[in-house]
Image (cartoon, helix red, strand yellow):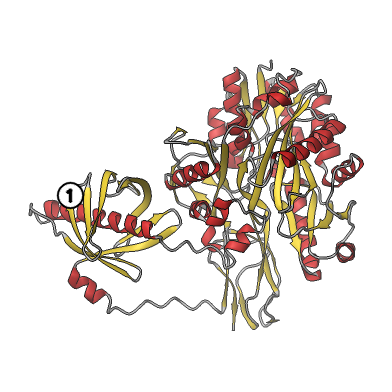
Amino acid sequence: MFTKILIANRGEIAVRVIKTCRRLGIKTVVVYSDADAGSLAVEMADETVHIGASPANQSYLVADKIIAACKQTGAQAVHPGFGFLSENASFAQRCADEGIVFIGPNPGAISAMGDKIESKKFAQAAGVSCVPGHIGEIADTAEAVKISEEIGYPVMIKASAGGGGKGIRVAWTRQDVEEGFPAVRAEAKASFGDDRIFIEKFIESPRHIEIQVLGDKHGNVVHLFERECSIQRRNQKVIEEAPSPLLDEATRNAMGAQAVALAKAVNYDSAGTVEFVAGQDKSFYFLEMNTRLQVEHPVTELITGLDLVEQMIRSAYGEKMAFGQSDLKINGWAIESRIYAEDPYRKFLPSIGRLVRYDPPAEGEKDGYKVRNDAGVREGDEISMFYDPMISKLCTWAPTRLAAIDGMGRALEDFHIEGLGQNIPFLAAVMDEERFRSGKLATSYIKDEFPDGFNGTTPTAVQLDILTAVGAAMQRVYATRARSYESGLIGEARDAWVVAIGETRRRVKVAGEEGAVAVELLDEGRTLFLTDIDWRPGKPVFKAVLNGLAFTVQASPAAEGFTIRHRAAKTRVLVLTPRSAELHDKLPEKQAADTSKLVLSPMPGLVVSMDVAAGQQVREGEVVCVLEAMKMQNIIRAERDGVVKAVNAKGGDPVAADEILVEFA
């Protein structure tokens, strides 16, 4: 077995590979850029090598630097993780030429399958069902428009070397192609160093289902069943699960057989994924093959009991696979939620910054489910604008799908992050949403269920009880301590209060101590009993049991009252004296500032281009500017007709969230 492996990647996947190598007794080398100098992966590795500046094209994408690091440290093999050089056939061949083992498929398989255009040609030749489209390179925007209109809208514009949701646009009109084609080409060039583009028919209301395959160097290939990855936004997977709630045994076997046949046709000898687009009627078409480890591989590991990183290492070393297809079984159900540094309340735009607080749920066995959290960060780390905004991958496993979903909901409750925007509330909303729980999924799910964007959810009856009880309990603690420490008066705290949540007013009577509180709902004739309270002033997380239901909320004092969030229901909770409640209802509502004549930067990033000038007449829908963050280009359009009064940024300028870019007269 190898004695030293270099990991040509960063963040969570670098940490993931290190953990398996440690278990196998293999020493690790991690390469790092300026931005990752203090990262968890650098801390965990046995050796480290600095390879350049923060932009990936000056560090992680420079093959010469990776090869030099291998020679410098004596690493026998390279694990490329996912992204960067993981699907680069030239790099894999370069490793072979230099006597370094590439822990992934052979260069021929990468060339055949890693290239999205060539993979479709191979799939067609192998008799695999394919999506209608133009299989070939496209020279320019005019040709892209011509091809799109021949195929028929909607079409998908995709980078040939793409992956991870980068370099993809769905075009519904000619204008979408004219704007989307150059944007996809730019993203592809920046992310993969390859700007070749192809176009295929976009199948409406599809599901995204992929088959995990595994091969060795002795001609053996198996599939490890499927993953459903239909919950996506901007073509980036957000929630994955294994197995899929759509497939029956016959469809699963058919998809698996096609995936294995395709892998064998190109002598595939590592972990890889054959992706399919599936109709609601269980029809399916080959989409592409990812010749690398997938971000979502943990859910496959949880239902099969296999370590895919270990299997990749053993295959690369030349070991024969120790099992066959008949040895593999599906055990239970697994869900993965990708925790992203993005603001779901601002259309999921990237949110970079420091993890002021990072407190994930404890891993391991819980009450009826298991928790796994794959992360490459710690509290105090910074999420950089140079790389993908994923913070961690939170996974739960349980015997059934609903139990795994319920476990995920509880795990998301227990996940606390401060310092930047993150999508935990949105993920929690999906776990509670009936359509998701029923398994009626599609890649349009987020657009369908949140057409106006995500604005949190309205508290359910149970959540109103939780918010009421928590607010009353917090107020009692603060009031008791205030009497004791500030005024010097020791005695009974006030017990009659009014809890105000939005338009709801509840008269309550509160009794008990800090560890257990009873909140009597005077107008409803029932009592909320809070027990096992784990909270004290200054602590941002409140854990307790409400009438037998364990829960966790994020809670903190606000300018008035408390801000409390349970899953996706976030609200201000006021705990008032009866007289204060009467007066409070007479206060006028604060009016929001008028920003209708301003174009604000929706995120921190870099201005790629400013497309308007002072004095210019602009129509609704026209492009105002293009911003780039986390390797994604975002087109900012005018929301109304108007004349530009002032332009406050130019191409190349860094901008902060809510910075005024353009003012209209």
Is residue 157 rendered to the left or right of residue 488? right
279 over 626 or under it: above or below: above
Residue 18 lies, in percent from the top left, at 59, 27
- Reply above or below: 609 against 549: below
Residue beneath the point at 89% across and 51% down: 135
Q: Which residue is mark 1?
A: 512
Residue 132 showing in the rendered view = yes
52 horizontally vs 124: left or right: left
Q: Quadrant of the N terminus?
A: top right
Which residue is more in the foreground, 255 or 214?
Answer: 255
Residue at 67% x, 60% y is 652
Considering the image in quadrants, where does the C terminus appear?
Answer: bottom right
Residue 129 position in % (x across, y down): 84, 46
Crowd around label 1: few <14 · some 14–19 · many ≥20 (10 Å): some
How many numbered circles does the render carry? 1
Label 1: state its secondary structure.
strand
Q: In the rendering, at what x and y percent does residue 17 appear?
A: 62, 29
Amino acid at pointer 1? Gly
Could you tell me if residue 90 is visible in this image? no
Q: Residue at point 79% right, 24% down?
A: 220
Indicate left or right for 468 with 90 as reference. left
User: Could you say where residue 323 lies in the image, as x and y percent from the top left?
Assistant: 71, 21
Depth check: 31 or 568 in front? Answer: 568
Q: Residue at x 73, y 20 (%)?
A: 321
